[in-house]
């Protein structure tokens, strides 16, 4: 059976070239936030993951559905941001961008964003 190694969410784009990323492994949280026009204030934080289980974001049996998802269109042409979710297993890496119309993708996105708010909002 496949084992999830990490899950990440990355958003980038917008007027100032913002980027934000969270990667969760079984033992660590990696967070990055910054702007292309203000690199001096970019933030990189690593914390111990003692609360979050990767299987709580997406069950291993849901990986097949995730792997079949189609990415949505880029929102950057209208000065928007794109969001990509990556799931790395023992053997494969799945990347899906802007699939907000898919319930599974949207669910993973909401859970990841909730962790950003809870764990890193004070540092931003």
Image (spheres, rainbow, N blue to C red):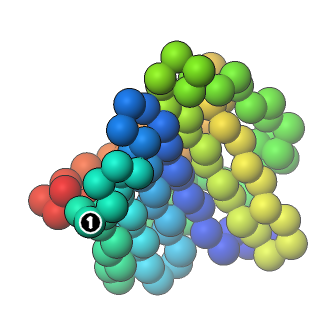
The correct choice, above or below, for 62 with respect to 104 in the image is below
Quarter assignment of residue 43:
bottom left
Q: Nearer the viewer, residue 112 or 74?
A: 74
**Quadrant (top left, top right, bottom left, bottom right) of the N terminus:** bottom right
Image coordinates of residue 92 in percent, x first then y, are 84, 65
Quarter assignment of residue 110:
top left
Q: How many marks?
A: 1
Image coordinates of residue 67 in percent, x first then y, are 82, 45
The correct choice, above or below, for 27 with respect to 118 in the image is below
Residue at the (52%, 78%) spot, across then down:
26
Element assignment for label 1: helix
Q: Is residue 96 left or right of residue 41?
A: right
Sort mark 1 into few (<14), some (14-19) or many (20+) by Cα contacts within 10 Å. Answer: few
State the residue lying farthest toward the top. 78
Residue at the (80%, 75%) spot, across then down:
90
Q: Nearer the viewer, residue 3 or 44?
A: 44
Residue at the (52%, 50%) spot, across then down:
10
- Residue 3: tell me if it is visible: yes
Image coordinates of residue 11 in percent, x first then y, are 49, 44
The correct choice, above or below, for 5 with respect to 34 in the image is below
Q: Is residue 54 left or right of residue 29?
A: right
Residue position marked by numbered label 1 in the rendering: 40
Residue at the (19%, 56%) spot, across then down:
124
């Amino acid at each position: 059976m496949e084992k999830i190694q990490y899950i990440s969410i990355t958003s980038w784009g917008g007027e100032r070239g913002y980027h934000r990323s969270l990667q969760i492994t079984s033992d660590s949280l990696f967070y990055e936030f910054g702007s292309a026009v203000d690199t001096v204030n970019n933030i990189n934080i690593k914390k111990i993951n003692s609360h979050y289980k990767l299987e709580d974001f997406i069950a291993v049996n849901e990986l097949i559905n995730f792997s079949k998802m189609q990415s949505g269109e880029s929102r950057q042409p209208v000065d928007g941001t794109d969001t990509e979710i990556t799931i790395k297993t023992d053997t494969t890496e799945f990347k899906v961008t802007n699939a907000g119309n898919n319930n599974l993708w949207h669910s993973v996105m909401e859970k990841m964003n909730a962790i950003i708010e809870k764990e890193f909002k004070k540092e931003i």
